[in-house]
Image: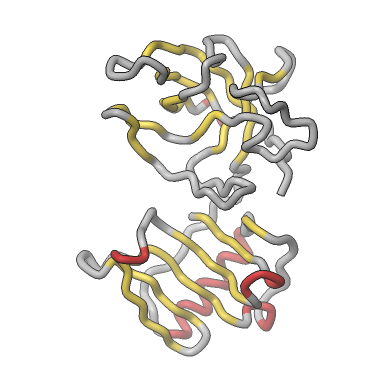
């Protein structure tokens, strides 16, 4: 689930995205101040828009919002009151974390991609395909987990690169919008004492 709020940019509307979906695939159904977005073919709910959301809760920030369990419960009340059935599940875990590259091998169908097994939070190890020239095993890195919104608005979903599954993105300083980001290509390599699984603060 990816939630976004930017009152200055788009008004008092909370956008919640539940699956990767293009505008051409979508249909919409509105009831009061809640709009359900669903896949036209499968009818599966892929998101909700909550209009005039400040009447129901106070949201701070501009961009991705990590909703608390209590906030998700309030949104589910709005969904049910509007007459929709598909409820939201809270996921308050950080979306940018320190990762540890446990394994890094060359992609069998690419001369520049690597396939990594990278530990993120809670001891979970995920496969991430990375195109950075400086990626290597035993590095501490920053991982944008599935469900993250990058500072430039890019959404991170489960994907596939050249036939290999990829579950997240290993980030460069520039992609993280860090103030001292180098123009040199490559992922950001953290100090060895960085704590695997810890949340990593990013710029907006």
Q: Give the vertical position of 124 relative to 155 (above or below).
A: above
Q: Nearer the viewer, residue 196 or 49?
A: 49
What is the total number of numbered labels drawn onto the structure image?
0
Q: Is residue 34 above or below residue 117?
A: below
Q: Is 157 on the left-hand or right-hand side of 188?
A: left
Q: Quadrant of residue 29?
A: bottom left
Question: Which residue is found at the position 62% from the left and 43% from the top?
Answer: 94
The reply, left or right, for residue 21 in relation to residue 91 is left
Which residue is rendered at x = 79% and y = 31% of the image? 180
Q: Say if 21 sits above or below 132 in the image.
A: below
User: Is residue 72 visible from the viewing direction of this image?
Assistant: yes
Q: Residue 188 in the image: x percent, y percent?
A: 65, 24
Q: Is residue 71 left or right of residue 61?
A: left
From the top left corner, tell me how far across and down residue 65 is, in percent. 64, 58
Which residue is at a point 50% across and 73% down the rendered structure image? 49
Residue 109 position by quadrant: top left
Residue 70 x/y as whole percent? 63, 64
> Would residue 121 be visible to someone looking at this image?
no
Does residue 163 lie above or below 51 as drawn? above
Q: Residue at x 47, y 77 (%)?
A: 79
Q: How is the image coloured?
A: secondary structure
Residue extending furthest toward the left? 41
- Where residue 159 appears, as percent x and y from the top left, is 36, 39
**Residue at the extreme right:** 180
Relative to the observer, which residue lies in front, 48 or 74?
A: 48
Q: Residue furthest bottom?
A: 32
């Amino acid at each position: 689930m990816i939630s976004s709020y930017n009152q200055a940019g788009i008004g008092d509307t909370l956008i919640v995205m539940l699956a990767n979906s293009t505008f051409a695939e979508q249909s919409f159904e509105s009831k009061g101040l809640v709009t359900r977005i669903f896949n036209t073919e499968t009818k599966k709910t892929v998101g909700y828009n909550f209009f005039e959301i400040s009447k129901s809760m106070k949201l701070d920030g501009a961009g991705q919002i990590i909703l608390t369990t209590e906030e998700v419960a309030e949104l589910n009340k709005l969904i049910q009151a509007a007459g929709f059935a598909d409820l939201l599940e809270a996921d308050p875990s950080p979306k940018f974390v320190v990762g540890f590259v446990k394994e890094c091998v060359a992609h069998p169908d690419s001369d520049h991609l690597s396939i990594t097994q990278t530990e993120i939070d809670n001891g979970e190890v995920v496969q991430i395909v990375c195109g950075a020239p400086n990626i290597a095993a035993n590095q501490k890195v920053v991982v944008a987990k599935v469900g993250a919104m990058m500072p430039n608005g890019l959404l991170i979903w489960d994907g596939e690169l050249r036939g290999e599954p990829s579950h997240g993105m290993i980030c460069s300083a520039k992609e993280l919008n860090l103030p001292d980001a180098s123009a040199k290509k490559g992922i950001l390599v953290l100090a060895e004492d960085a704590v695997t699984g810890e949340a990593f603060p990013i710029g907006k």
